[in-house]
Amino acid sequence: KQEVTQIPAALSVPEGENLVLNCSFTDSAIYNLQWFRQDPGKGLTSLLLIQSSQREQTSGRLNASLDKSSGRSTLYIAASQPGDSATYLCAVRPGSARQLTFGSGTQLTVLP
Amino acid sequence: NAGVTQTPKFQVLKTGQSMTLQCAQDMNHEYMSWYRQDPGMGLRLIHYSVGAGITDQGEVPNGYNVSRSTTEDFPLRLLSAAPSQTSVYFCASSYSRASNQPQHFGDGTRLSIL
């Protein structure tokens, strides 16, 4: 059974810092991996989706990498801002399954 | 552009009551799914549908029913509410289950069972 782990569960950084969020998964046979952002009381917003054949994806200040062989993905946030404060979740789509398997998220707080 | 719309946003039920959580999408997506989110456990799949008239069970289907009579709507029914079903429920959709496109989520329904 695929398991997805995100460490740390919570992270607090001062504004302007570059930071990395980690995601690991147990089964490397994935179709793709997706990073989401969740604001309090809201749904999930897709940030980046990386196909299994890709190594990284970039959108603005965000860069997500994927290393399938080691079962790891990272989300890099450059020059963090207080507006980046949210919970970040990663989810993998196993190659043969229909659903996403989610990690429990990292709650990020960027202090002004 | 509404995206995925869930109603109601909040609901309180008594044990044993039944109710339907509504989900509608206006993006002509084939694939729709329901998740529940509990503290420290991430999101877990309840049921999903790959198209009108086709549904299947996810990881935690017990106590829930679904149907998909149209492409747009995918309601989730709680048959006899139990306190263990207190959770936040999210509906999601995407173009197809094999799509390279991301899944889109609604804002959730926060459900409390007393």
Image: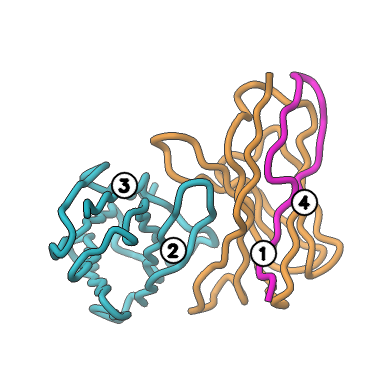
Chain colours: A cyan, B orange
Q: CA distance from mark 2 to mark 3?
A: 22 Å
Please provide the residue range marked out in magenta.
Answer: B1-22
Q: Amino acid at mark 2?
A: Arg
Nearer to us: label 2 or label 4: 4
The residue that label 2 is drawn on is A93
Q: Amino acid at mark 4?
A: Gln
Q: Nearer the viewer, residue A38 or B91?
A: A38
Whether B13 is drawn above or below A24: the answer is: above
> Residue A68, position in %: x, y?
24, 68
Q: Pointer 4: residues within 10 angstroms few (<14), some, or many (20+)? A: some
Chain of residue at mark 2: A
* Res. A32 image quadrant: bottom left
Q: Nearer the viewer, residue A67 or A82?
A: A82
> Residue B80, position in %: x, y?
78, 26
Q: CA distance from mark 1 to mark 2?
A: 20 Å
Secondary structure beneath label 1? strand
The residue that label 1 is drawn on is B4
The residue that label 4 is drawn on is B22
